[in-house]
Image (cartoon, coloured by chain):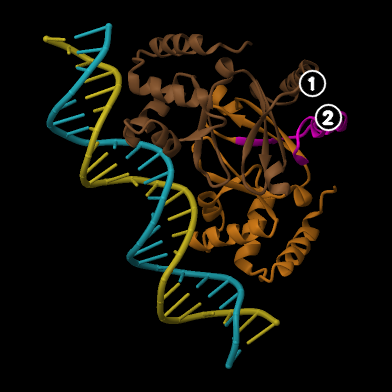
Chain colours: A brown, B orange, C cyan, D yellow
DNA sequence: TTCCTTGCAAACGATTTGCATTGGA
DNA sequence: TCCAATGCAAATCGTTTGCAAGGAA
């Protein structure tokens, strides 16, 4: 697993979309650009402000297509609002710290050793459940620096 | 942190609600009962089916009140649907397996040794972030037994 | 009595979709 | 050319809320 440099990302996305028989149009590129430069997961409304030449409905459709192609990772904040970020294979694996007070989500990185330990942990679960397990995320909760003050 | 036995739970919930100056009505008790016996986080619609003497809007209101009183834990599935479960201090700590295909969430328990390892991991994070960390959940993703067939 | 709570229906808001038009391979 | 993609408006659907009736302290 490795992180792609910015210029590589569009190529990688284009390939992924091609595999799904969809085009990498300028509207979709704008969405990827915004997500790439954003400091955290973005909602459709936020992306609409960033790239306001693209109508909201198109942004929703772009997000859906990109998500289905495995380019994005979708999650929801405390209010249920959908937020997207580039998928792990594009932006790298990371875990999340969720603020119980304001709902902010911040990316957290573990040491390779810790990630390895997590991975081993998940492996043992394969034996105790009848699921086919593929990935993991450690979600840590607490209060972010802003809410602590 | 300890798990309460079933009969204790209602007492604990009643006390929590009293602290927030709200009553523990029969409608709210039904919601807690359903959550208690469920195998995973429940949506308002699912709770409505289980306790269909209580109208949907009341279930929503009960969930909101119980959540604000710290009795419940709220999260969202892949489709953004809100799902609730009893808070950890009532039902005990556990982790989640999320099916990437159907969105089902199932509770997973780790061994005490694994939980200890996770806890240690979170402790080290306290030193590398400026957050005040309080809890953690390991989210494992994969395909549930039903979707594998 | 005095509030809190409930039921019902109407209102909301994020997201989706129908359909005619546009645009890229 | 041909079909995917777009824009706009209308439709969906989970969730919230206003208001009058019911209930517990």
Which residue carries the number 2 mark?
Answer: B124
Nearer to us in this view, B147 or A107: A107
* Residue A34 or residue B54, whichever sits in front: A34
Residue at 49 percent across and 10 percent down: it is A7
- From this viewpoint, which residue is outermost toward the front? A149
Q: Position of residue B100 (x, y in %)?
A: 55, 27
Image position of A60 with respect to B70: above or below: above
Residue A137 vs B105, above or below: the answer is: above
- For label 1, count other residues whose C-alpha is less than 10 Å away and answer few (under 14), some (14-19) or many (20+): some
The numbered disc on residue B78 is none
Q: Are marks 2 and 1 on the same chain?
A: no
Q: Is residue A73 visible?
A: no
Answer above or below: position of B108 versus B32.
above
- Report the side of A72 relative to B17 (left or right): left
SS for dot 1 = helix
The picture places residue A84, in percent across and down from the top left corner, at: 51, 30
Q: Is residue B90 magenta?
A: no
The quadrant holding residue C23 is top left
Tags 2 and 1 in contact by the CB under 8 Å rule?
yes
- Residue at coordinates 52% horizontally, 28% vertically from top-left? A38
Give the side of residue A74 with respect to residue B6, left or right. Answer: left
Residue at (70% x, 56% y) in the render: B71
Magenta-colored span: B105-134
Tell me which chain the residue with mark 1 is part of. A
Pinpoint residue B135: horizontal percent, then vertical percent. 77, 41
Q: Which residue is mark 1?
A: A114
x%, y% of residue A126? Answer: 72, 21
Vertical order, A17 against B140 (above or below): above
């Amino acid at each position: 697993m490795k992180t792609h440099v910015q210029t590589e990302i569009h190529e990688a996305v284009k390939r992924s979309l091609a595999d799904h028989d969809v085009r990498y149009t300028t509207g979709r590129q704008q969405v990827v650009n915004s997500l790439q430069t954003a400091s955290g997961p973005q909602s459709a409304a936020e992306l609409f402000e960033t790239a306001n030449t693209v109508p909201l409905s198109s942004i929703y459709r772009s997000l859906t297509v990109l998500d289905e192609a495995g380019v994005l990772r979708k999650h929801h904040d405390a209010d249920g609002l959908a937020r997207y970020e580039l998928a792990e294979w594009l932006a790298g694996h990371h875990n999340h710290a969720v603020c119980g007070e304001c709902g902010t989500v911040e990316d957290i990185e573990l040491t390779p050793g810790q990630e390895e330990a997590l991975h081993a942990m998940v492996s043992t679960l394969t034996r105790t459940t009848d699921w086919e397990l593929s990935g993991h995320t450690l979600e840590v909760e607490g209060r972010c620096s802003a809410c602590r003050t």
